[in-house]
Image (tube, grey):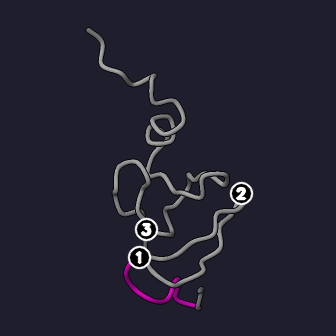
Amino acid sequence: MLNKFGFSGSGEAQVQYLDGDFRVISPGTYVRCAVTGEQIPLDELKYWSVDLKEPYATPEAVLKRHYPGAFQPKG
């Protein structure tokens, strides 16, 4: 929930991931990356999957989730 100072609440937010946007269902200040577990402040959330309903901290996390075989160690 937004107020004039930003997102209200503390802790982990519950978010609905939409095409090109997201909606905060339960207030909080962050969500957790589905790949790394890293906390992502809501004002920095840029990457998510609408189909899988999960957020990602970085473009690399997106690739690891959607193309896991591409990140196998060589050798």
The mark nearer the N terminus, 1 or 2, is 1
Count neighbours of disc 1 (C-alpha within 10 A) and say few if under 14, some if 14 to 19, many if 20 or more.
some
Relative to 18, 49 lies left or right: left
For the stretch drawn in magenta, what is the main secondary structure?
loop
Where does label 1 land, which residue?
Answer: 12
The mark nearer the N terminus, 2 or 3, is 2
Where does label 2 land, which residue?
Answer: 20
Q: What amino acid is at disc 3?
A: Pro
28, 67: nearer the viewer:
67
2, 25: nearer the viewer:
25
Indicate the quadrant containing the C terminus: top left, top right, bottom left or bottom right. Answer: top left
Q: What amino acid is at disc 1?
A: Glu
Where does label 3 land, which residue?
Answer: 41
Q: Position of residue 1 (x, y in %)?
A: 59, 86
Distance of mark 3 from mark 1, alpha carbons?
9 Å
Residue at point 45%, 22% (across, down): 70
Relative to 35, 67 lies left or right: right
Q: Where is residue 18 in the image (x, y as percent from the top left)?
A: 70, 62
Distance of mark 1 from mark 2, alpha carbons?
21 Å
- On residue 4, the disc is none
The single residue placed furthest to the left in the displayed view is 75
Q: Where is residue 45 in the image (x, y as percent from the top left)?
A: 52, 61
Q: Give the range drawn in magenta.
A: 4-11
The mark nearer the N terminus, 3 or 1, is 1
